[in-house]
Amino acid sequence: MILDLKKVFAAVLLLAGSMLLLGGTPASAASLPDFTELVDEQSPAVVNISTVRHAGSSRRGRENIPGAPNDEMEDFLRRFFPPDRFRRPDRDAQSLGSGFIISKDGYILTNYHVVASADEVKVRLNDRRVLDAEVVGSDRRSDLALLKIDAKGLPTVKIGRSENLDVGEWVLAIGSPFGFDYSVTAGIVSAKGRSLPTAQDENYVPFIQTDAAINPGNSGGPLFNLEGEVVGINSQIYSNSGGFMGVSFAIPIDVAMEVVEQLREHGRVSRGWLGVIIQEVNRDLAESFGLDRPGGALVSRVLEDSPADRGGLREGDIIVSFNGHDIDRSGELPHYVGRTPANSKAELEVVREGKTIDLEITIGELPGGGGEEEVASNDTSLGLQVESLGDAIADRLGVDGGVRVTSASGAAAEAGIRRGDVILRLNNSVIQSVADFERVVDELPAGRSVPVLVRRNEAPVFLALKVPE
């Protein structure tokens, strides 16, 4: 059948005109939410956060200098030129992020990575005031930081409950992407309970996944539901280009407020610790262990003298329930364990040799408070940036300690130290942690060569490091 396009077009126009005359709107437009009132009410409590790290500062953490060469580019240039030919000059490092006010007396919540290793933190309010901020406490594992400014009577956000969120629900983000203050984006909740392991193979946050456009600078900003309540803190994006690609992740506000309470009271965060290395149970493993379907967390190692060891857990056990919470995927277990208070009792249901048994285990405290001082070190004299190892990485490498190199330049690069190396000994001193590394570095003899033992590709290698004068 051949249609007369002119007649079809005329009919469409007539229908649209009739809807306008009758006050009608298309069903799709009528169902879209109106965010204007929410933005008017909540945007005054959203702030812009800028940080400065002074050139040559020994504060710990990794630099974030826009436009600076990355490690891969420096490795390429190092093949053809001496390090001094391409090493970027020292300069102040600046970063931008977002945050939101949670109390009238000036407490502000943002991401850990927004303020990590900063020498100065400044907060720009909705009324254009710029105030110095104090970092009350920070927690790397949850990527959260609590700030305090000297001000009274400030506007605050409404705190909601992330556990009440439903997949498909509308959410709205307010922040400063690329430095553009008070930008608003909207989307839906794509998924809940996403596990995103860190470089230390830790995953203590069940992230909210959304398709609201989140870009650099949105970090630390609030994620609202349609009731105008904060249900998450925008934290990460999934991207191959550095820009938004339709997948972003927010920290649930329920988790964040538990962290805030501890940071405000103690300046650090205590988490529960079980002391096991776990892995996913796939279909083949489920069949081999006699399960009717994949599920649970398979214990591949029990750490010696850990709460799990003392409580009777064994390698090969499959944890299918923790304190009444079913464990469908292995990544769910750290979320529940981390939120369990240390020294409290936990009820575990495990499958052992085809039989289900119940265990009661006293939960310990996760070693290391997750604060900035325990995470990384940036030694400018040697050109080394290192970070601590997580239990899972140390177990995979078969080492009891050490620190992993995240960047090497200057004297370290000339010695042959590479990104990804694990430093086990420095100047004949055993390196168990970042604190050990910094203590030994401070005692190195200037102008002399010292031995460095690194683990590279599962093999030990000794290198000679010339300490600058």
Image (cartoon, rainbow, N blue to C red):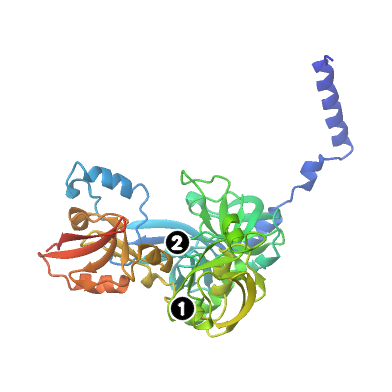
Q: Position of residue 297 (x, y in %)?
A: 57, 66
**Residue 333 visible:** yes
- Report which residue position mark 1 lands on: 267
- Which class describes the residues within 10 Å of circle 1: few (<14), some (14-19), or many (20+)? some
**Numbered tag placed on residue 441 in the rendering:** none
Q: Is residue 222 visible?
A: no
From the viewer's perspective, is 190 left or right of 445?
right
Foreground of the two, 2 or 41: 2
Q: Which of 176 and 203 lies nearest the eye of the viewer?
A: 203
* Mark-to-mark CA distance, 2 and 1: 17 Å
Residue furthest to the left: 447
Amino acid identity at mark 2? Val
> Height in image: 443 above or below 46?
below
Q: Residue at x 62, y 69 (%)?
A: 354
Q: Nearer the viewer, residue 323 or 465?
A: 323
The residue at the point 51 percent across, 56 percent down is 236
- Neighbor class of circle 2 (other Cα within 10 Å; few <14, some 14-19, many 20+) is many
Which badge, 2 or 1, is on the more N-terminal residue?
2
Residue 444 coordinates in the image, percent (x, y): 16, 70
Q: Position of residue 304 (x, y in %)?
A: 42, 78
Position of 273 with respect to 320 (left or right) is left
Residue bearing the label numbered 2: 114
Pointers 2 and 1 in contact (C-beta within 8 Å): no
Q: Secondary structure at mark 1?
A: loop
Which amino acid, mark 1? Gly
